[in-house]
Image (cartoon, rainbow, N blue to C red):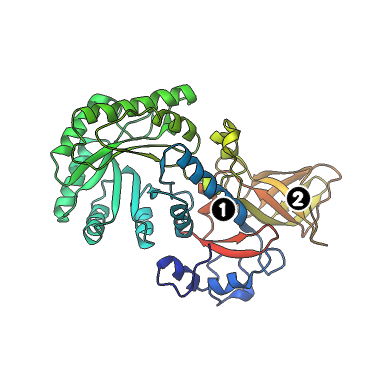
Amino acid sequence: MAADPQSDHPIGQLADERVDHRFKALPPDAEGLTVGALAAQRRNLFTGGFTTPVLALSAESVEHNLALMEDYSTRHGLAFAPHGKTSMSPQLFARQVAHGAWGITVAVPHQARVCRAFGIQRIFLANELVDAAALRWLAGELAADPDFRFVCYVDSLRGIELMDAALREAGANRPVDVVIELAAGDAARTGVRDEATCLDLANAIAAADTLRLVGIAGYEGEVPDANAERVAAWLRRLVALVVDFDKAGRFADLDEIVLSAGGSAWFDTVAEVFAEVPELSRPVLKLLRSGAYVSHDDGHYRHLTPFNRHPDEGALQPAFRLWAQVVSRPNGTQAFANAGKRDAAYDLDLPEAQVVRSARDGSVRPADGIAVTGLSDQHAWISTEPGTELEVGDWVGMGLSHPCTSFDKWQLIPLVEADGTVSDFVRTFF
């Protein structure tokens, strides 16, 4: 992942950023070095001056996960636009594209601007976009770069009206590509609730020369009481809508039709149903958008990943480990470490104590009899079984649940090799 500090590309320029107080856990004696210079020193995470708490990404697991999803998408005939909101790391975006990704998915205008600032040429905004200021920016990006591809959701006549007005006012010279979002149920999040309304929106889009209908999309993770059968049934509605629109000539002027779904919990069912798409008048871009895979986790997605149902297809590896130091041991069944809600994801599951690194000799042992039971802002509450060896100064390595709320707490994350060597740093932009 290391970038050339001399590169003129914005990702290369990240290596020129100076290390200072903005970045948690970096060695105090590295103050003033560039990120590239610090990475070149290949310090050890445990003995190289890093302060606790410190979040680390496994270099080997990240590479494994990138390669696994590239192979999976290719094997199932899917294009891949991983959701960038997970990491908001242009370095990881670039590696995802290098591993065959069609582009990057985002959710809000800020995330699209980050992608563009770092050279992403294809963006799928999996949300409605009705912000006039953002649409003016988008019109400028499309006008300045004929190779830039952008697609976003629509789900209302009012939204179409707002988009059209803003784009006209901006003097847009290229139409914005849109897909109609089909909701996953009446109580789901965004999206059109029924097929008849989808037809109304398609007519409105056709009447607005600032917009171009390029396909249908949605998010199966919102299917109520989701299981494989319910998710597949909703995905078949998605496919049927594309087929009906194609028969009606809605996509006659396109090079390809966009059909998109796919979070991190049901991409196997997406692959299964999208394989059933009949031959249409144009090639179909079957676009998967799973994002959590890049780091995976030790909680929520460890239980939900479709690879649990298909072990023959491989297995993702959790790449995060949060290291905190025991700062208090008030009694034989209680300890406190110096990492809390500011450092660790806690919205789905608490961190999982996995290993302990001795402050006396650096030896590492399993965290048997040790559990995180709660988080304060800057403390982890740890319970220990009677007689468990754990003392002040020991480092506790914890697995995390939910990548999206792990990345967003850290601006610069050490990329660590199996022996503890820090080989690079991952910059995030939340």
**From what the image shows, is residue 314 above or below residue 406?**
above
**From what the image shows, is residue 124 above or below residue 13?**
above
- Per the model, the C-alpha gap separating discs 1 and 2 is 35 Å
Question: In the image, is 146 to the left or to the right of 27?
Answer: left
**From what the image shows, is residue 225 above or below residue 156?**
above
| Residue pointed to by mark 2 | 335
Farthest-out residue, right: 387
Q: Residue 119, which numbered label?
A: none
The residue carrying pointer 1 sits among few (fewer than 14), some (14 to 19) or many (20 or more) residues within 10 Å by Cα, namely: some
Q: In front here: 37 or 282?
A: 282
Q: Quadrant of the C terminus?
A: bottom left
Mark 1 residue type: Glu
Residue 239 in sight here? yes
Mark 2 residue type: Ala
Residue 58 in sight here? no
The residue carrying pointer 2 sits among few (fewer than 14), some (14 to 19) or many (20 or more) residues within 10 Å by Cα, namely: many
Image x and y of residue 367, in percent: 76, 47
Q: Residue 63, which numbered label?
A: 1
Image x and y of residue 315, in percent: 60, 40
Secondary structure under the numbered disc 1 in the rendered image: helix
**Residue at the spot x=58%, y=75% of the render?**
31
